[in-house]
Image (cartoon, rainbow, N blue to C red):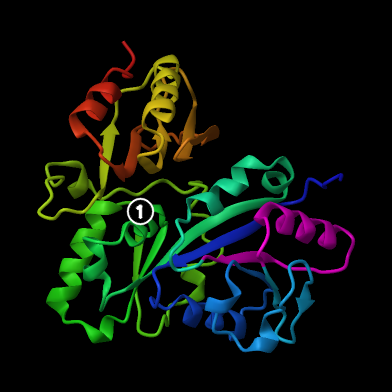
């Protein structure tokens, strides 16, 4: 199949634990007038509470709805479905502006995101715009200590929607937020009742691709990494203005992927490389790692390396030692 070099189709991955409000948000996206056609891929038909006529009970059949959305259910391979969508669009059978994938509430979003790195046609035609995780503010504290899936969904997120905020006190919400920040300080947080967020805050934001500078709150780079809870998922962030040695960085990343890949849920950031006029943006999911030259450093901006690791069993001292060893002589 010959694919044109047109702009890639953005993909939003919607995740969140059972009952968090994913379907409520999906229905809002389906019904709200945003002047875009959205292909919806649902990876478990039985869980999705859309009216039956909105979801086509067939693996590959695609139907354009009156509101301009295209819905299909996925029971087979996501790669095959995405290839089918791309081919159908090239043939002129369907037209859509973006794809939204809703994962089952018990899903680890990593394999879904990895799909866009693994298949040549898929990665050429589509790109992940963001991973959006809906959090049930009323019940999430129960899952912090018992449900790995809930923690991993938070760890993978670019956007975290703290939903059902009307059902918790300000103090409870503050505690939830502090624990989420410990797991994933780089994610943007939104607050909602019935997932009533502005869709402009979650669609078309290009946060996964890190074209915009990674914003890491300086407070989380200092001494705030001690944890008062037993959360299995934690985050470690680094910031360094001295340039790094690209050869040492490559060796370090290769080591991390091979030795620590299973424990590294998400890692992403920007490298300031010695003698390079361009920023190097990178991100990884478990064993998959991708880095590329971004735009040139601007004259007025501080050249700085910023990166965050989110995962399990992270050894801050070890990572810090390895990171410091990458600083150029």
Residue 33 visible somewhere in the drawing: no
The residue at 28%/22% (across/down) is 322
Pick whichever, 269 or 101, lies toward us: 101
The residue at 44%/68% (across/down) is 105
Q: Dividing the picture into quarters, in which one does residue 295 lie?
A: top right
Specify whether residue 85 is painted magenta.
Answer: yes
Q: For the magenta stretch, what is the residue range?
A: 74-103
- Dot 1: element: helix
Q: State left or right for residue 312 relative to residue 15.
A: left
Residue 294 image point, x, y percent: 53, 36
- Image: 28 above or below 61: below
- Image: 56 above or below 121: below
Residue 176 image point, x, y percent: 21, 67
- Image: 320 above or below 165: above
Q: Dividing the picture into quarters, in which one does residue 17 lie?
A: bottom left
How many residues crowd around disc 1 within 10 Å: few (fewer than 14), some, or many (20 or more)? many
Residue 50 image point, x, y percent: 58, 85
Residue 319 visible somewhere in the drawing: yes
The residue at 35%/84% (across/down) is 193
Quadrant where the N terminus is found in the figure? top right
The residue at 62%/89% (across/down) is 51
Q: State left or right for residue 149 relative to residue 229.
A: right
Farthest top residue in view: 329
Q: State left or right for residue 281 relative to residue 125.
A: left
Question: Which residue is disc 1 drawn over?
Answer: 155
Residue 38 image point, x, y percent: 67, 71
């Amino acid at each position: 199949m010959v694919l044109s070099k047109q702009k890639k189709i953005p993909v939003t991955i919607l995740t969140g634990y059972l009952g968090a409000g994913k379907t409520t948000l999906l229905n809002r996206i389906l019904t709200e007038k945003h002047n875009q056609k959205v292909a919806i891929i649902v990876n478990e038909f039985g869980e999705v509470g859309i009216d039956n006529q909105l979801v086509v009970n067939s693996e590959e059949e695609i139907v354009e709805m009156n509101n301009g959305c295209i819905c299909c259910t996925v029971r087979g391979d996501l790669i095959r479905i995405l290839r089918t969508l791309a081919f159908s669009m090239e043939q002129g059978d369907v037209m859509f502006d973006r794809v939204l994938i809703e994962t089952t509430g018990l899903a680890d979003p990593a394999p879904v995101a990895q799909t866009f790195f693994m298949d040549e046609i898929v990665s050429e035609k589509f790109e992940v715009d963001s991973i959006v995780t809906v959090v049930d503010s009323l019940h999430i504290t129960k899952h912090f200590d018992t449900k790995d899936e809930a923690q991993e969904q938070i760890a993978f997120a670019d956007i975290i929607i703290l939903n059902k905020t009307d059902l918790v006190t300000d103090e409870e919400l503050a505690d939830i937020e502090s624990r989420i920040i410990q797991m994933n300080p780089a994610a943007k947080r939104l607050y909602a009742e019935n997932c009533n967020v502005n869709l402009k805050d979650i669609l078309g934001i290009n946060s996964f691709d890190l074209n915009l500078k990674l914003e890491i709150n300086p407070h989380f780079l200092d001494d705030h990494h001690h944890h008062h809870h037993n959360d299995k998922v934690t985050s470690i962030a680094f910031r360094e203005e001295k340039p790094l040695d690209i050869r040492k960085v490559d060796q370090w990343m290769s080591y991390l992927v091979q030795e620590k890949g299973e424990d590294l849920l998400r890692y992403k950031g920007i490298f300031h490389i010695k003698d390079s006029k361009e920023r190097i943006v990178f991100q990884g999911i478990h064993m998959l790692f991708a880095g590329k030259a971004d735009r040139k450093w601007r004259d007025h901006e501080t050249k700085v390396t910023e990166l965050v690791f989110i995962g399990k069993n992270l050894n801050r001292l070890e990572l810090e030692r390895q990171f410091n060893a990458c600083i150029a002589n």
